Amino acid sequence: MLNFDHLGVLSAAVIRLLREERERQNISGKELARCCGLNQSTISLTDRGLRKPTLETLLRMADVLKVRLGDILLQAEAEGGAKPKVSKKEAGTE
């Protein structure tokens, strides 16, 4: 089970990590939005923490960036986000 008190921290970390990956790949917010089929304002508001993206939006972003959302979640958790009580093996990530 997740510690729901830390979901905001986890969400912010996931968004930050996706933004950092986008910047590392030199992909603009406008280009990411176009490739995801989203409005540029959605990416901009998400990057600034003013909009919480849906799971579908996160998956689209990860797909365009060619990263696994599960890996981003694990990295966010390792950085102090919500800690699941499920092992990597049980979650199927090993």
Image: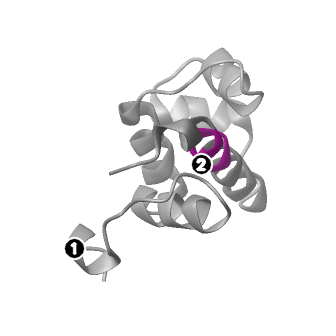
56 left or right of 28 in image: left
**Can see residue 87?**
yes
What is the span of residues highlighted in magenta in the rendered image? 9-14
Q: Position of residue 27 (x, y in %)?
A: 71, 48
Residue carrying label 1: 90
Q: Residue at x 67, y 64 (%)?
A: 79
Is residue 21 within the magenta segment?
no
Per the image, label 1 sits on a secondary structure element best described as: helix
Q: Position of residue 65 (x, y in %)?
A: 54, 55
Residue carrying label 2: 14
Per the image, label 2 sits on a secondary structure element best described as: helix
| Residue 85 higher or lower than 53, as above or below | below
The amino acid type found where label 2 is placed reads Val
34 left or right of 21 in image: left
Q: Residue at x 59, y 48 (%)?
A: 14
Q: Could you say which is closer to the camera, residue 43 or residue 27?
A: 43
Q: Nearer the viewer, mark 2 or mark 1?
A: 1
- Separation of disc 2 and disc 1 at Cα? 21 Å
Q: Position of residue 33 (x, y in %)?
A: 58, 30
Q: Could you say which is closer to the camera, residue 52 or residue 57?
A: 52
Is residue 13 within the magenta segment?
yes
| Residue 1 higher or lower than 49, as above or below | below
